[in-house]
Image: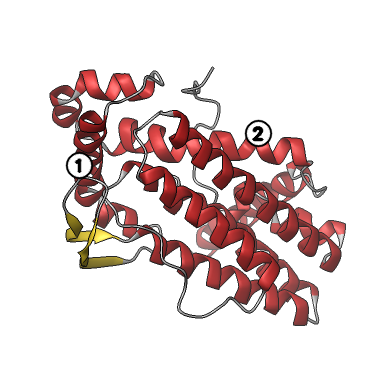
Amino acid sequence: MYRLLKRVVLTAVTGLALVAALLMAWTNPEPWSPTEVRRLTIGLNEAAAIGVPHGFLMAKSARESHLALLQKVEAGELLSESESRQYRQVFQKVLHDSQSFLAAFDAQLTILDNVDMASPNNVTTQGISGHHDHHDVSARANFAAMLHSLEGLDQAGNPISRIGYANAVQKDLVDLISHMGVAPHTVSVPYTPPDSPWADNELGGKFEAMTKAFKDAQFAPVNSEPYWAAVDAALANYADLILLVQARVVSRTATWERRVAGRFLSTQTGAPPVDIQRPLRRK
């Protein structure tokens, strides 16, 4: 029995070591180019805004009930003001019904009750009523965690610490779009700046510009020119943020350390298994 157990454990350890070695061999330690990053951000946004909520989270009955409206959004067609209000309320309910599932994968998911009920929202009522993820707060929690990991990376004195912090940085960086990519399709209130400036002015400025632009998109008809202008501005700032963070990680790590830690969207960073090649709403 002991020999069998020893053999099983040895086989498992050998298998894990082989998987780790293959993963490291497949991981490109070199930084993404600006062109590649901008392509990735577009795909990630479509996955966050359409692919996951429309295709994975939404119940079949909900999709059937609003099929014509959903297909219009997915095709990139302009929604009217009233259609946009209806769509955002449908979308909000899908996220509400998926809270437990989403929270299991994201420690920064921030569920709040009846937010800013005195403020006008984007569906001609007041505030964010009910029990919902407040995307701005969740994204800021992710960004704060990322800054903490970058600070740890600056101070790390050994490869294990550098690998751990670099890996955490990349995970938080991709989680930002998971929170904010859905924001233009939800019920929300206008952007408000953080209570205090971010300690890192350069990265904080890019993050807040991204957040504000996504918030601006919330108040434009879905798939309208103002909507896309705001989304484009948000993704441009997100791409800049990725490139700035990537440069800092590269300057503080060795090539082999980045093979272990993974770069942006590498498997070992816990990147969400979403389809970033899905058809785009804008052809």
- Mark 2 vs mark 1, foreground winner is 1
Query: Nearest the camera: 129 or 267?
Result: 129
Q: Secondary structure at mark 1?
A: helix
- Report x, y in % for residue 117: 18, 65
Mark 1: amino acid: Gln
Of mark 2 and mark 1, the one earlier in the sequence is 2
**Crowd around label 1: few <14 · some 14–19 · many ≥20 (10 Å):** some
Query: In the rendered image, which quarter is residue 59 located in?
Result: top left
Q: Quadrant of residue 51?
A: top left
Residue sitting at 52 percent across and 36 percent down? Answer: 229
Residues packed near mark 2 inside 10 Å, few (<14), some (14 to 19) or many (20 plus): some
Q: Residue at x 21, y 45 (%)?
A: 123
The residue pinned by badge 2 equals: 39
Q: Nearer the viewer, residue 221 or 183?
A: 221
The C terminus lies in quadrant: top right
Numbered disc 2: secondary structure: helix
Residue 201, visible in the rendered structure: yes
Report which residue position mark 1 lands on.
89
- Residue type (three-letter) at the residue carrying disc 2: Arg
Q: Is residue 151 left or right of residue 271?
A: right
| Residue found at x 16% / y 22% | 64
